Image (spheres, rainbow, N blue to C red):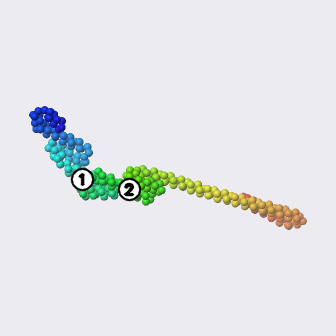
Amino acid sequence: VRTAAAAALVGNADSVATFLGERLPAATAEDNRFTLTEALVSAGKATRTGIGQALSGGDAAVAAYLQGGFESAVHEDLQVAVTTVNAHGGKAVKRESSEALATGTDFALRDFLSSGQYRAHDEDQRVEVTSILVTASPQVREYAERALDDGSPRAIQWFLTTGQYIARARDEESAEIQQLVKIVESEGRRAELKTDEAVELSEQAVQAAAKAKAAALEAKAEAQAAEQDVQRSARAANKAARAAQGAAAAAST
């Protein structure tokens, strides 16, 4: 329309009259069709259907659609969009979307879609972080509290999508290290116990050998003192033999 009007204005009165009577309606119809075609890119399902019907109906149908015929289709698309968000949202998102649907005006629906859903989503994410804290391991708790202290949607989102998994990995690594430390400490205690047992057995063997040696010396002395007494010598020899056997048994354990 602008191009045709500019051309008419530089001409004479007949050019203007021709523009107003003939070219203006054609240029307006062309602009209307272009407007609807351009709207198809971002339109919802109901709006696209309405645009298609208008374009198929001719210039009069296109003009009627632009003058108000689109309103019911746009309202339907807004309702569908809010309902879709409601179906996939958390508690706060469901609450706010339900209020928008109950109000039912285009303004309420648009306000929810443009800003209300994001505020509600932030609220739901903070609640999710708080719920994780209830059973959080040490690193997860630290990361969650850091996100809540920051308070920004970006910090909360980062914790839920990335931070909590980094924290869980660190907690698992720490648990594995602690388990290894416990195993090493347990094995150390067992080795120490075995060493103490070996030392005790060694000391018992030394004591038994000393007793056997003393018994042998005593038997020798008794044998020398009782050379004429065969029975006494035999008893002394038997005593020495038993002492030697005891020492050998102690040493073998």
Answer few, some or many: residues within 10 Å of disc 1's Cα (few below 14, many 20 plus, some between 14 and 19). Answer: few
Disc 2, SS: helix
Rendered residue at 51%/53% (across/down): 174
Rendered residue at 59%/56% (across/down): 185
Vertical comparison of 18 with 91: above or below: above
Vertical comparison of 238 with 42: above or below: below
Mark 2 → mark 1, Cα distance in angstroms: 27 Å
- Nearer-N-terminus badge (2/1): 1
29 on left or right of 78: left
123 on left or right of 108: right
Q: Outermost residue toward the top?
A: 11
83 on left or right of 12: right
| Mark 1: amino acid | Phe
Q: Report x, y in % for residue 76.
A: 23, 52
Q: Which residue is mark 2?
A: 126
Rendered residue at 84%/62% (across/down): 220
Residue 227 visible? The answer is yes
Using the rendered view, name the quadrant where residue 141 is placed.
bottom left
Q: Report x, y in % for residue 232.
A: 85, 67
Residue 57 visible? The answer is no
Tag shown at residue 107:
1
Rendered residue at 16%/40% (across/down): 28
Q: Outermost residue toward the right?
A: 228
Vertical comparison of 29 with 100: above or below: above
| Mark 2: amino acid | Arg
Depth check: 11 or 125 in front?
11
140 on left or right of 66: right
Answer few, some or many: residues within 10 Å of disc 2's Cα (few below 14, many 20 plus, some between 14 and 19). Answer: many
Depth check: 55 or 105 in front?
105
